[in-house]
Image (cartoon, rainbow, N blue to C red):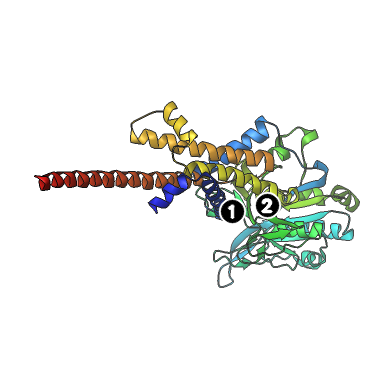
């Protein structure tokens, strides 16, 4: 093994070939790692910093068409229903979203089913109420729309009491991240086959179907990644704090349904109408601060439309080149970068040397992540690779040092043996 390493170090074409093979392995590893809900804290910091630089300082943040959306808040449109215990006895009241108001909105929109682009209702319907008859009648007729459902504690679907086109709206990774309640990565298909609301919205609106693959799925003729970091082009600021001319249309459910039918249809014409809790309970922490759950679903849908999770040839080539370069450095003894760092930051202290070498890899992969975000609009969680590549480099160094020490020892023993032979030969002559 050590002799092989020495031969490889002396053969640059072979070293380049191994670096390229290692780069392919790293690409496969990082694509697999990105599917995991776990994310290092430093990677979260890097992603937040990259977003700040790109969208705030460099002003590369492009906003979707403001006339395309109507956000309808139902957080304060409540009604009380009787709450019963396990034996069916009434023990008090519980508040739910007003079913009459929602029923009226769906009824009016069903009168002209092609008037709106799409209707997303992100409301939980697990309890029955005396006012459910209108929703029972109208939701099954919903043409361009979808109703959210969620999973229970055992990861089994909890379906609503109404029949309607359904989509899973869970923020899966937030409860499993190492950051408290952080919604970072979004999984388009959860479990084995549960399609999420953003994916189903995209399929219905663009007449496409996700094609399952052995390694990567396909959507609209492109290979895509099932798990990706959502870019949030629409944020709370755009709903509540931006200047009036730059705000997205936002209304409360109560004020919308009190309008005449033709006015409601005018407000919803050619728009994606999103009904949900934007101000109260359905709030999640993201890299852009706290965002409402319905807004996260919309941003995930927009990410699909923008192709943020497409595995393009340009993106894969970018990863291959950057990973091959750093692999060549890690596999090469006394490479120019290492020599420069030793001269520029010389130290005989072990911990300082460790910090110097490790910091180089951290900075390198941080730059790769930033370039990926700027040029491909894809956030990467790759800082973990800095520890791996550093380990590879130290492994190569250790093996070669052992080889050198063994060679020196063998040379010393051989010299001693030669000296003994000479002494013995002189003694024989005497």
In the displayed structure image, the side of residue 74 where residue 388 appears, left or right = left
First along the sequence among labels 2 and 1? 1
Could you tell me residue 315's position as x and y percent? Answer: 67, 47
Residue at x 70%, y 32% (from the top left corner): 59
Residue at x 65%, y 41% (from the top left corner): 373
Could you tell me residue 61's position as x and y percent? Answer: 71, 37
Of helix, strand and loop, which one carries label 1?
Answer: helix
Could you tell me residue 176's position as x and y percent? Answer: 52, 54
Residue at x 31%, y 46% (from the top left corner): 407
Residue 341 appears anywhere in the view: yes
Residue 268, relative to residue 94: is it above or below? above
In this orientation, which residue lies closer to the viewer: 9 or 336?
A: 9
Callout 1: 10 Å neighbours few (<14), some, many (20+)? Answer: some
Of helix, strand and loop, which one carries label 2?
Answer: loop
Residue indicated by mark 1: 31
Considering the image in quadrants, where does the N terminus appear?
Answer: bottom left
Whether tag 2 and tag 1 are in contact, CB under 8 A, the answer is: yes
In the displayed structure image, the side of residue 203 where residue 381 appears, left or right = left
In this orientation, which residue lies closer to the viewer: 308 or 147?
A: 308
Callout 2: 10 Å neighbours few (<14), some, many (20+)? Answer: some
Residue indicated by mark 2: 311
Considering the image in quadrants, where does the C terminus appear?
Answer: top left
């Amino acid at each position: 093994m050590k002799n092989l390493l020495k031969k490889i170090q002396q053969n640059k074409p072979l070293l380049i070939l191994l670096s390229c093979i290692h780069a392919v392995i790293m690409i496969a590893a990082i694509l697999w790692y990105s599917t995991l809900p776990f994310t290092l804290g430093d990677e979260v910091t890097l992603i937040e910093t990259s977003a700040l630089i790109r969208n705030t300082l460099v002003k590369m943040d492009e906003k979707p068409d403001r006339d395309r959306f109507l956000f309808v808040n139902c957080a304060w449109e409540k009604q009380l229903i009787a709450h019963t215990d396990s034996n069916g006895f009434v023990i008090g009241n519980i508040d739910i979203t007003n079913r009459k108001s929602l029923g009226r909105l769906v009824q009016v929109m069903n009168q002209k089913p092609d008037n709106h682009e799409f209707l997303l209702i992100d409301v939980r319907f697990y309890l029955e109420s005396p006012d459910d008859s209108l929703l029972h009648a109208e939701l099954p007729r919903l043409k361009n729309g979808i109703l959210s459902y969620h999973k229970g504690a055992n990861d089994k679907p909890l379906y609503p009491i109404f029949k309607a086109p359904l989509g899973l709206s869970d923020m899966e990774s937030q409860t499993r991240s190492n950051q408290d309640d952080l919604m970072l990565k979004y999984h388009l298909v959860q479990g084995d086959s549960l399609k999420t609301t953003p994916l189903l919205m995209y399929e219905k609106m663009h007449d496409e179907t996700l094609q399952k693959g052995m390694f990567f799925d396909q959507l609209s003729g492109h290979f895509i990644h099932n798990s990706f970091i959502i870019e949030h082009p629409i944020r709370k600021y755009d709903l509540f704090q931006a200047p009036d001319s730059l705000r997205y249309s936002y209304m409360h459910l109560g004020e919308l349904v009190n309008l005449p039918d033709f006015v409601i249809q005018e407000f919803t014409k050619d728009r994606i109408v999103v009904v949900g809790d934007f101000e109260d309970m359905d709030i999640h922490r993201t890299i852009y601060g706290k965002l409402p759950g319905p807004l996260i679903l919309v941003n995930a849908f927009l990410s699909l439309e923008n192709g943020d999770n497409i595995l393009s040839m340009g993106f894969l080539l970018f990863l291959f080149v950057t990973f091959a370069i750093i692999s060549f450095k890690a596999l090469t003894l006394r490479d120019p970068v290492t020599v420069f760092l030793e001269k520029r930051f010389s130290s005989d202290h072990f911990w300082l040397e460790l910090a110097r070498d490790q910091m180089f890899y951290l900075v390198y992969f941080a730059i790769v992540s930033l370039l990926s975000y700027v040029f491909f609009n894809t956030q990467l969680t790759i800082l973990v690779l800095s520890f791996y590549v550093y380990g590879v480099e130290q492994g190569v160094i250790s093996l070669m040092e052992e080889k050198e020490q063994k060679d020196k020892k063998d040379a010393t023993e051989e010299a001693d043996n030669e000296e003994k032979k000479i002494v013995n030969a002189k003694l024989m002559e005497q």
